[in-house]
Amino acid sequence: DPIPTLQTNVIGTTNLMLAFGEYGRGKKRKIIFSSTGGAIVPPGVLRGPGREEDATAALSPYGLSKKLGEEIIKFYANHFDFNYVIFRYPNVFGPRQNPHGEAGVVAIFGGLMKAGQQPTIFGDGTKARDYVFVEDIARANCLAAIKGRRVTINLGRGAFITDRMIFDAVARATQFKGKPRFAPYREGEVYRIAINASRAKKILGWSPRVNLEKGVQKTIAALP
């Protein structure tokens, strides 16, 4: 649904930057922007975890809106003289993630398994993402409040975690004994992505602390 996506993420970001430029000139100001690490990478290019400079092509209207949002922030940072850190997020998961939403596979799988229902995997289970627990993401944002100047930073574990690995981890946490349902792969999704976060370690002193198994257990424990 490209029109509302672009209106929200492109026009919305522009409105915020204009307001940011109008108020507080001459003061120390900083924007921390949550972009995407998985929707602006060319398909079939990455063999290992992707670096910031690898993110050059949008795979969907959402990825395009985030890429444009990054450029809008850079433009107005120069125009209005403010600071920014652009974070390219991996798949973020953790407590209070909506198990009934359209995104958030750990919470969705967890909600279904706790109800004894069969989750659906789109594809054959080998599609891979990079997953980071929400506590680690929050810690990165706190660090960026005081570190980093006009920089784009990946946040990730650097590990290719497949849909089947997520299914199995959630099944262990919920003691679910069933098998997944498989459905056709959805166009516009990157098949394989992991994120190189060496810049985050260098600039922020950040790396993820919570491993996948522990993060899944915490997420499942918080579900109703």
Image: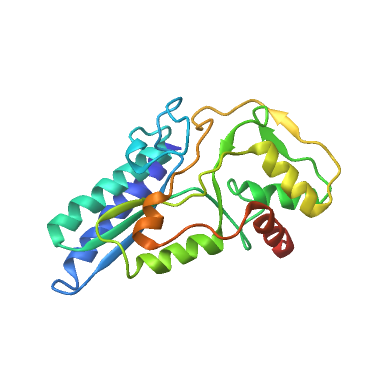
Residue 6 sits in quarter: top left
The C terminus, quarter of image: bottom right
Instruction: Give the quarter of the image for residue 67.
Output: top left
Locate residue 85, reporting x and y percent: 31, 58
Q: Residue at x 24, y 49 (%)?
A: 72
Q: Residue at x 73, y 52 (%)?
A: 111
- Residue 134: image quadrant is bottom right
- The percent coordinates of residue 159 (x first, y second) are 55, 43
Residue ID at (31%, 48%):
69
182 over 159 or under it: above or below: above
Q: Is 191 placed above or below 67 here? A: above
Is residue 76 rendered to the left or right of residue 223? left
Q: Is residue 116 placed above or below 222 in the rendered structure? A: above
Q: What colouring style does the render use? A: rainbow
Q: Is residue 99 left or right of residue 140?
A: right
Q: Is residue 8 left or right of residue 17?
A: right
**Picture coordinates of residue 148, whole percent (x, y):** 30, 62
Q: Nearer the viewer, residue 66 or 192?
A: 192
Residue 20 percent location from the top left of the image: 23, 65
The reply, left or right, for residue 69 in relation to residue 175 is: left
